[in-house]
């Protein structure tokens, strides 16, 4: 496995020197809920640190295609795989936008394809180098013409999973809505027809089976499936 990128190493070094660890301190595992005491004590400070370290325009160094680890991406056994007809699939983009969208998979696939080979990192401690292909989320948001008060983005999935991101992270040029994995059509188990993928967020932030993207001015009481059970909200790398 390739060493961490300088950006990722500097981020982790900073957190370690400040007495924090973006992975070890905040979360214990993908399927394990952290202590509420730890989460509530450190979450506001840690989120501000992570937001400060995020450069919403700077690209994360990618890997060559030869580094792809085709069998390393673990499929969580607790996932309830929904039954989605790709031909009937629609991605809704609504909320604080001037032009709500209702897009088919075919419409998404004729948009400019962005491909990136990045490391997918799970809070459980494992990682996988994966090549994702899809549409930049920032391009979809631009099509929807966001209102000036849109500050957060919610993702709703067909299986009932829900997640929220800050707007700068959502508009990062390597945040994609993907329908390809390692040059092939995305499998249902990995989130087909459409899922989130980004090198700047931990795995639980990268929703599978996304059917709706909603822009909002403020975070709702329900921040995310795992966050509402104690996980840290920002989830940055």
Image (tube, helix red, strand yellow):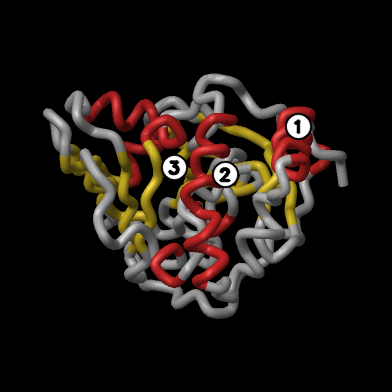
Residue 73 drawn at (x, y percent): 69, 60
The residue singled out by tag 1 in the image is 10
- The circle on residue 177 is 3
Residues at marks 3 and 1 touching, judged by CB atoms closer than 8 Å: no
Question: Residue 185, relative to residue 237: is it above or below?
Answer: below
Which comes sooner in the sequence, label 3 or label 1?
1
Asked whether 37 or 194 is in front, the reply is 37
CA–CA distance between discs 3 and 1? 27 Å
Horizontal arrangement in the rendering, residue 35 relative to residue 159 (left or right)? right
CA neighbours of label 1 inside 10 A, class few (<14), some (14 to 19), many (20+) = few
* Element assignment for label 3: strand
Residue 98 drawn at (x, y percent): 12, 29
- The circle on residue 118 is none
Residue 221 drawn at (x, y percent): 26, 60
Q: Quadrant of residue 225?
A: bottom left
Residue occupying the point 86% across, 40% down? 2
Horizontal arrangement in the rendering, residue 143 relative to residue 44 (left or right)? left
Residue occupying the point 38% across, 72% down? 82
Asked whether 203 or 113 is in front, the reply is 203
- The circle on residue 236 is 2
CA neighbours of label 2 inside 10 A, class few (<14), some (14 to 19), many (20+) = many
Question: Residue 112, relative to residue 228: is it above or below?
Answer: above
Asked whether 24 or 93 is in front, the reply is 24
Which comes sooner in the sequence, label 2 or label 3?
3
Residue occupying the point 69% across, 65% down? 124
């Amino acid at each position: 496995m390739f060493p961490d990128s300088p950006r990722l190493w500097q981020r982790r070094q900073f957190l370690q020197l400040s007495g924090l660890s973006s992975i070890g301190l905040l979360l214990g595992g993908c399927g394990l809920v952290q202590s509420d005491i730890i989460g509530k004590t450190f979450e506001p400070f840690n989120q501000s640190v992570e937001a400060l370290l995020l450069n919403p325009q700077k690209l994360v160094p990618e890997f060559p295609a030869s580094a792809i680890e085709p069998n390393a991406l673990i499929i969580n056994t607790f996932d309830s795989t929904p039954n989605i007809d790709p031909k009937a699939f629609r991605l809704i983009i609504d909320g604080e936008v001037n032009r709500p969208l209702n897009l088919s998979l075919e419409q998404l696939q004729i948009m400019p394809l962005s491909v990136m080979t990045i490391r997918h990192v799970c809070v459980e401690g494992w990682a996988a180098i994966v090549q994702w292909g899809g549409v930049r989320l920032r391009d979809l948001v631009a099509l929807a013409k966001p209102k000036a008060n849109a500050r957060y983005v919610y993702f709703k999935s067909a299986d009932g999973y829900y997640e929220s991101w800050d707007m700068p992270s959502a508009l990062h040029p390597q945040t994609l809505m993907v329908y390809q994995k390692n040059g092939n059509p995305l499998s249902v188990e990995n989130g087909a027809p459409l899922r989130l993928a980004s090198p700047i967020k931990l795995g639980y932030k990268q929703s599978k089976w996304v059917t709706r993207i909603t822009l909002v001015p403020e975070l709702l009481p329900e921040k995310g499936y795992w966050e509402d059970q104690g996980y840290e909200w920002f989830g940055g790398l």
